Amino acid sequence: MTKVRDLTTPMPQTIGFDISVEKALAMMKEYACHHLPVLDGGKLVGVLSDRDLSMAWHGSGNIRAEHLVKDLMTDTPVVIDPSAEISTAIRTMLDNRINSLIVRAEENQPWGILTSTDLLRYIMDKA
């Protein structure tokens, strides 16, 4: 069976919690990604998704480019073990209505991220 570690993007692009939303948008565009793990002094403190940004821009109308990542990020990222089955990752995403999971580091491997896009590519490769 395929495990989460097999589809994980190790050491994904990250952003600081005190960086502007404008910079976050630019990074997502530059790196063609939809999720940025948020760090504070090297410690994971959240995840910022393009969905978080979109909901803030279109929902309240009060969000401006100078707002900070910490104002919009999800501050309780869902973490999964790299040895978990892919079906567990899919179920976790569905149950939490999210599109990414932070993958816990193991032994000498860095932590990573698993996204719904990674899972869709996997499913398409199997089809």
Image (cartoon, grey):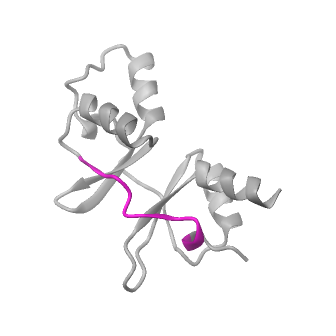
Image location (x, y in percent) of residue 3: 63, 74
Which quadrant, please, contains the N terminus?
A: bottom right
Q: Residue furthest bottom?
A: 107
Name the residue nearer the viewer: 28 or 99.
28
Q: Residue at x 39, y 53 (%)?
A: 76
Left or right of 86, for residue 28: left
Q: Residue at x 40, y 75 (%)?
A: 105
Q: Residue furthest top?
A: 61
Image location (x, y in percent) of residue 47: 38, 48
Left or right of 50, for residue 20: left
- Image-quadrant location for residue 41: bottom left
Asked if residue 6 lies in the magenta stretch, the reply is yes
Q: Is residue 113 above or below residue 34?
A: below
Image location (x, y in percent) of residue 60: 39, 17
Which quadrant, please, contains the C terminus?
A: bottom right
Q: Residue at x 60, y 54 (%)?
A: 118
Asked if residue 64 lies in the magenta stretch, the reply is no
Q: Is residue 71 above or below residue 122?
A: above
Image location (x, y in percent) of residue 86: 67, 66
Q: Residue at x 22, y 27 (%)?
A: 67
- Image-quadrant location for residue 28: top left
Q: Which residues are magenta?
A: 5-16
Q: Is residue 65 above or below residue 112?
A: above
Q: Is residue 50 above or below residue 45?
A: above
